[in-house]
Amino acid sequence: MSTQRHRVDFLVLGSGAAGLSYALQVAEFGSVAVITKADASESNTQYAQGGIAAVMDQSDSFENHVRDTLIAGAGLCDEQVVRTIVGEGPKEINRLIAEGASFSKQDGILHLGREGGHGKSRIVHAADTTGEVVEETLLDRVKSHPNIQVYQHHFALELITDHHLGQHVSKVRPDIKCFGAYVFNEKSAEVETWLAKSTMLATGGAGQVYLHTTNPGVATGDGVAMAYRAKARVANMEFVQFHPTSLFHEDARSFLISEAVRGEGAVLLNLDGHQFMEQYDSRKELAPRDIVARAIDDQLKTRGEQHVWLDISHKPADSILHHFPRIHARCMEVGIDITKDKIPVVPAAHYMCGGVFTDVNGQTSIERLLACGEVAYTGLHGANRLASNSLLEALVVGSRSAKLAAELITTSTWNEEIPDWDDSGTTHPAEWVLISHNKDELRRIMWDYVGIVRSNLRLERAARRIDLLYEETETFYRRSRVSTGLCELRNMIAVAYLVIRSASIRRESRGLHFITDYPDTVENERRVTLI
Ligand code: FAD
Ligand code: SIN
């Protein structure tokens, strides 16, 4: 079978808020291909509940939003980046509204929700289905744009760089270029060569690296792993955000109970019915989520219990139904009526604050490679992301990188010397049982040893076990035909390695990274972890 070669001006890997919003804007300047590994809407974006943080009210100010972001980021945010992204938030909200997104209103004006760490109500939302509204709005526009083609069930395997021209690239260099990507077409089971004048990495997060996560199955950290193998800079991977409240129920494990529920007055109780947050932080339920997640973790560990309660049943039922129709419906499916019952919740891996190092225009350390959204590290989140700042970042940086890419392609050409994918010598189809076993093992190791509270001993244990999984999986990969499952496993191992290595480098506790051997925050350690 002959390998397909494609040529496109703008190659976009991923179809969440970052990829789609970027695609719509570069489409004015050339041809666009959006490559996405599942159904186009399947993404972290699709499941976002709380909303998008932006200064949309006279009583609020950019200065307030900047301050809240810097406080949550625990000294590691890049203040200039924070100012730029916060400052351009309202423009992006208005752009989404112009594209057709319909957000919740009260008395004819946007209803602004409240979430932890925000000193003001500033969360633009569509009840508790904000992500779905954003995703569907952007996807509708993308699908009807004449310059954009969406390729579903196409898995981006590797970024194409100088390395594929036979040049040995052993470490980060300033002059590495990206020429596109090798993409596995799941239907034809063939690896295609996609040549591009510019490539946008918008592959989202990596929650699946942990046993318990709010993220859907597609969030396997492929983008960070591909960029790392291509010798891009990767930053701050130790900062994994655990959401305090995911539903604890065996039939609905990864379902998120939005922070907005606490914003509307829900309280956290231990199984004795005691409201415990006050003993950890004066902001109680509305403290930043690293503090709330650690408090719950502490309650569970010291009391030997499996979950805590989240209770909003003291609020009027019609208000609960109005604000949280999705959460109410999902909980009802498993027999919990949130207008009357307490909700059993536990923390779960939610968001990757680190990622592929970029500037505020999405430029990575590799030429012609941009990155945007959860896969990227811009400096906005620092050591802990403020709630609802990630969709904001995806949209603002998506727009800024579209401008950069439009300029970039005027001086780029397709590199025709790139060889097609060589799979000679790979005869065996991958055995699913080996892949699923290793995935499960990896996810448990990360949950048990590299979770909310870490220690040197646990990190060392995790590193040894991940090394073994790496050796075994690489051997297996070299002799097997490409499959999505096997490639995801490789990528998850790479992400796990990066998280453990970054966590081992940081000799302090800060924001989301808490390590018992170094419980204090140390001014000398206040720097970005770069790999
Ligand atoms: P995604 O939306 O995850 O999109 C990534 C895309 O890349 C997907 O289409 C995926 O299939 C594709 N992809 C991945 N790997 C490959 C590959 N190898 N080849 C091809 N395609 C690939 N943030 C907020 O700001 N506010 C919220 O209220 C909020 N709520 C959240 C609730 C939940 C349950 C979750 C999970 C997250 C929430 N977040 C929220 C975080 C936010 O949703 C994400 O950070 C944001 O949507 C990321 O957008 P993205 O475009 O970068 O990635
Ligand atoms: C939530 O709704 O609690 C999620 C918000 C976020 O992750 O930003």
Image (tube, rainbow, N blue to C red):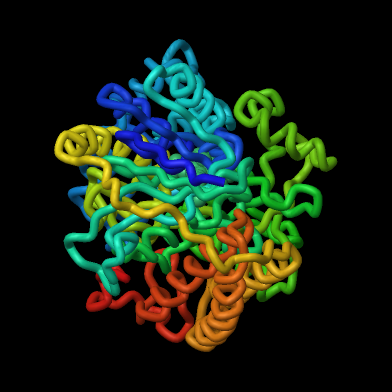
Front residue of this view, candidates 445 and 10:
10
Q: Is 18 located above or below residue 386 in the figure?
A: above
Q: Is 45 located above or below residue 193 in the figure?
A: above
Q: Residue at x 30, y 60 (%)?
A: 165
Q: Is 212 located above or below residue 467 in the figure?
A: above
Residue 298 visible in the shown view: no
The image quadrant of residue 196 is: top left
**Residue 363 location (% of width, % of height):** 24, 49
**Residue 92 location (% of width, % of height):** 32, 28
Q: Residue at x 42, y 59 (%)?
A: 226
The image quadrant of residue 160 is: bottom left
Q: Residue furthest right?
A: 335
Q: Residue at x 37, y 64 (%)?
A: 228
Relative to residue 292, is residue 60 drawn left or right?
left
Relative to residue 426, is residue 235 drawn left or right?
left
Residue 510 visible in the shown view: yes
The image quadrant of residue 530 is: bottom left
Front residue of this view, candidates 199 and 412:
412
Q: Residue at x 67, y 66 (%)?
A: 428
**Residue 248 location (% of width, % of height):** 73, 54
